[in-house]
Amino acid sequence: MGQPEQRAEGAGPFTTRLTWHRPEGETVVWESRLARRRGSLSVRGPGGGVSTSRAADAEALGRLRKLNAVASGAFVIGGALFALGAAMAQFGSGDAVQSASVYFAGGLFFNTGGYTSLLQVLNAPRHSHGGGPLVTARWRWWGYEPMRLDWLSTFVLFVGTLVFGVNLLDSFLQGLTVQQVNRLIWTPDVVGCVLFLISGHLAFAEICHRSLPCLRSRSLGWWVVAVNQFGSVLFMVSALAAFTRPATGSLVNTDIANWGTLTGALCFSAGGVLQAFERP
């Protein structure tokens, strides 16, 4: 029996979808996000019959469910705390230290969500040669795989949450000059937002199998990525509005800064809720 014909698709040098046309007429499709979130391959019978799903083993599926529950829950709680911190700042229901404390707590949940997202990639079942069953590798706490688009996206996301942590820690500092505020607090905020936007763009490339974003309204994964990316855009708008003018010592626009953070954070909470359903 001959070898299956293989076709690879993706963005740039990254492969995000593999299709095998097997000699017996069966077509097997591996997609990066489907495999790591749901532990599944798509299978079509001879003649393009009804698609079925070939799942990974029970160990892999249990692993994916647990990791997804932790990641989605962390983003829901982290987003809610960020929204609360922004509401406190906007409506004056607490002093600056209280608001910073709530933000910092939310940042810890974002750190957890970012790292767990990376663990989802590292410990997802892998495709085997010729479109065979998904293979479950040993558990890993860390790995370096820059030629995997899903690894790169989640790694950039995790680094972004760590950079936000620098911004949140520095926000506790007192007696800073305007220049120090912009260097120690504002700059990490902007860098973190840029990293979130890059991560979101890479996530779109993974799910669309091309460099440009696409519209896939029937895909739950697409909605997770889209809602989170909209939240990242709002975070960036908030960060730009939070720049402190050297001449006056005031923010560019306090209302936009607070409302941008609040609505962006709610997007991440909503994305976490949607992600809870993107599981095996």
Image: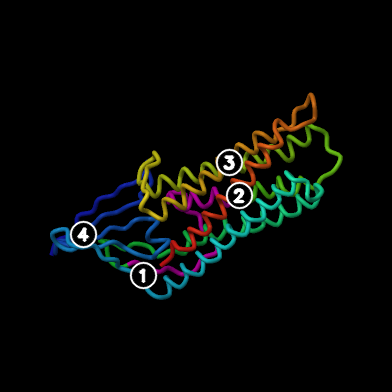
According to the picture, the residue beneath numbered tag 3 turns out to be 234
Q: Which kind of residue does numbered mark 3 sit on?
A: Leu
Of discs 4 and 2, which sits in the foreground? Answer: 2
Q: Nearer the viewer, mark 2 or mark 1?
A: 2
Q: Position of residue 35 (x, y in %)?
A: 38, 61
Report how far apart the C-alphas of labels 4 and 2 lie in the structure: 41 Å
15 is within the stretch colored magenta: no
Residue wearing tag 2: 265
Separation of residues labelled 2 and 1 (CA atoms): 34 Å
Is there a contact, CB below 8 Å, between mark 4 and mark 3? no
Q: Against 237, is 22 above or below?
A: below
- Residue assigned mark 1: 56
| Residue 3 figure quarter | bottom left
Q: Position of residue 278 (x, y in %)?
A: 44, 61
Of the image marks 3 and 1, the number of the one nearer the N terminus: 1
- Residue 159: say if magenta: yes
| Label 3: element kind | helix
Residue at mark 4: 27
